[in-house]
Amino acid sequence: MNAHGPAFPARVVLATGNAGKLREMRAILSPWHVEVLPLSDFTRAAADETGLSFVENAILKARFAAEASDLPAIADDSGLEVDALHGAPGIYSARYAGEPADDEANNRKLLRELENVADAERTARYRCAMAYLRWPSDPAPIVCQASWDGRIGRGPRGSGGFGYDPLFIVAGSARTAAEFDPAEKNRVSHRGLALRALVAALGGVVSEP
């Protein structure tokens, strides 16, 4: 441990089974030359996401991954908050249309729910909580949060990203998140901002995106 907190790890497990999240988080962490291992290398099981907030679920997932791998763990819990839906789908974003999780089904349901909502009232944001645990019983998890503002379009556009990206029109832009190239998205997204904040908290030197 350094004077400012836990040292940046040489190896870490990412507590996600989402291929899109794994790809993005590996890309964001690549400048720090950390060996990033997916949770699937250690178990096919997943944490029970019983928390009532992004922060609670991120800590639950990181604890599960640290226990399964015997490595420091990073987990994110993230989702879409739509103001006209009182913050839904929120922590249920991945399974909004039910199990098994399906991005297209989730997007179709979201468009149905907003069918009669005016464009000006379709404001939304992606929110991310990123948690780091040194070991399963770590009493001082590091948690960083970030958000990414936008609004929900009338139909999908773009072939990049995942989740609700084809519907999420980024604030200050006419493009959806799915129309951003991966490097550009990682610089400005909720997940990119939260993960870089976590790297800084662990002693990594973070340059401006």
Image (cartoon, helix red, strand yellow):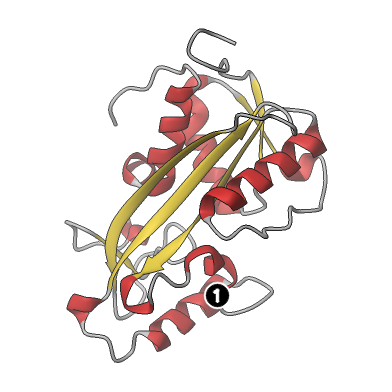
In the rendered image, the vertical position of residue 16 relative to residue 112, given as above or below: above
Badge 1 amino acid: Tyr
Q: Which of the 4 quarters of the picture holds residue 9?
A: top right
Q: Picture coordinates of residue 193 (x, y %)?
A: 38, 39
Residue 15 in sight from this viewpoint: no
Q: What residue sits right under mark 1 in the picture? A: 96
- Residue at position x 41%, y 88% in the image: 112
Q: Which of the 4 quarters of the picture holds residue 7?
A: top right
Q: Is residue 32 left or right of residue 148?
A: right
Q: Is residue 23 left or right of residue 45?
A: left
- Residue at position x 17%, y 76% in the image: 120
Q: Picture coordinates of residue 94 (x, y %)?
A: 57, 66
Residue 49 in sight from this viewpoint: yes
In the rendered image, the vertical position of residue 43 relative to residue 106, given as above or below: above
Front residue of 112 and 90:
90
Front residue of 81 and 192:
81
| Mark 1, secondary structure of its residue | loop
Front residue of 176 and 200:
200
Front residue of 6 and 170:
6
The count of marks equals 1
Quarter of the image for the C terminus: give it. Answer: top left
Q: Residues within 10 Å of mark 1 (few under 14, many from 20)?
A: some
Q: Picture coordinates of residue 171 (x, y %)?
A: 22, 58
- Residue at position x 37%, y 74% in the image: 156
Q: Residue furthest top?
A: 3
In the rendered image, the vertical position of residue 142 relative to residue 96, given as above or below: above
Quarter of the image for the N terminus: give it. Answer: top right
Q: Is residue 196 left or right of residue 150?
A: right
